[in-house]
Amino acid sequence: MSQKATIEIEGKKYELPVIKGTENELAIDIKTLRSATGGVITIDPGFKNTGSCESAITFLNGEEGILRYRGYSIEELAEKADFLEVAFLLIFGELPTKEQLEKFDTDIKANAHVDEDVKKIIDGFPKAAHPMGVLSSLTSALVAFNPSSVNVDSEEEMYNAIVRIMGKFPVLTAWTYRKHSGLPLDYGDSSLGYVENFIKMMFKKPADEYKSNKVVLDALDKLLILHADHEQNCSTSTVRIVGSSHAGLFVSLSAGINALWGPLHGGANQAVIEMLEAIEEDGGDTKKYMAKAKDKNDPFRLMGFGHRVYKNFDPRAKIIKKSADNVLGDLGIEDPILDIAKGLEKEALEDSYFVDRKLYPNVDFYSGIIYRALGIPTEMFTPMFALGRLPGWIAQWREMRLNKEPIGRPRQIYIGEQKRPFKKIKDR
């Protein structure tokens, strides 16, 4: 028998259905509340307790530190799959067969060419332009070069749009970095895998031969997998709500990039490095800053520790910590900023204040360390995040359109002035 929730408003009771998900999550279905009550709505600033959709893509349990894509644990995917397999899984619902993966890879490579006129757009940006602004603009500009809208009822058209953006987005991301770094634009090498080709497009110097580093490749592949989707976060919800107006895939993704730009979302790993740099400038005393973090009257915040969703531990951090250690060990980098990071990590994992409150280093902490070790400037951290999140955004947009979800249109409680007469300017 289906469950019901009863709500009483001004002495009148209303019954609302209760929905149960496949992981036994419960939700009160309020879509008929306003019509049944003659205008009553719920209010939930930040939508912390509001489900915007039913989704089959990602399951997240913050209390128990669980993250699964399409039912597969993030731990197993990071260990056994590569990024392209995970992208296919998120977008299409199942892990690909060998034949499906080969076709996916081939079709993405066939769509990796970016129109030469896009270089003119890049040339128009000053070198000092923030990479996220450049990447968002370039993604949106792709519409001009691919003007036809996608018929979501056509599997072929939907697939073609997906492989097109999967092919072009790494190029745009790498070009954004090279513009920022004053390097000539590079198309990479279609004989390489998806992630390795991206690394080559990023880092190959004009006069040097590209040499692959397996430790770096493995670390970036894992980072992209760990960032690939994270349920209904700010940028994902933005992609879905923009797409709900039947805006195209590219512009919906561009909107998601802009949402990711914020320091409370995708900019968190950049904030980690900026914090470490500030500590170094102040003498590098990690114990001093750990004490400041524990002082409730001190405005200092320890970035990269704890998580607004994970109340126990961030499962992604456990996976990427090993990769961060491997990268630092393999590259043998001497960097006082990274030394401070390792010092903070050690103290936080041993300090009862942080352990009792489960303020462990999160994925942003370790991703910031890895990017810093690879010589990636902090302004490029969020574009790297966007590349990882791309398949999740695509999957969410595709699911929303296939489910024919209605246009997003939140309500509000008005708290402004009541009706009042207009005053002529001489009487104001």
Image (spheres, helix red, strand yellow):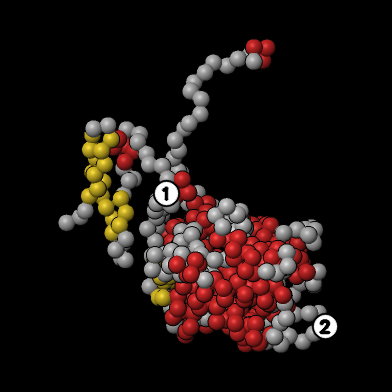
The correct choice, above or below, for 405 with respect to 88 in the image is above
- Residue 177 location, quadrant: bottom right
SS of the residue at dot 2?
Answer: loop
The correct choice, above or below, for 194 with respect to 66 in the image is below
Q: Residues within 10 Å of mark 2 (few under 14, many from 20)?
A: few
The residue under the point 23% across, 32% down is 11
Front residue (pair 63, 24): 63
The location of residue 136, given as percent across then percent down, is 65, 58
- Residue 105 location, quadrant: bottom right
The residue under the point 62% across, 76% down is 342
Residue 9 in sight: yes
What amino acid type should be assigned to the residue bearing mark 1?
Pro
Locate the N terminus by quadrant. Answer: bottom left
| Residue placed under numbered mark 1 in the picture | 406
Q: Residues within 10 Å of mark 1 (few under 14, many from 20)?
A: few
| Residue placed under numbered mark 2 in the picture | 207
The residue under the point 30% across, 50% down is 28
- Residue 274 location, quadrant: bottom right
Locate the C terminus by quadrant. Answer: top right
SS of the residue at dot 1?
Answer: loop
What amino acid type should be assigned to the residue bearing mark 2?
Ala
The location of residue 67, given as percent across then percent down, is 43, 70
Q: Earlier in the sequence, mark 2 or mark 1?
A: 2
The location of residue 31, given as percent across then percent down, is 34, 45
Q: Residue furthest left?
A: 1
Direction from residue 224 to residue 22 in the image, left or right: left
Q: What separation in Å lies between label 2 and label 1 (alpha carbons)?
A: 53 Å
Please report contact status of discs 2 and 1: CB closer than 8 Å, yes or no.
no
Residue 386 in sight: no
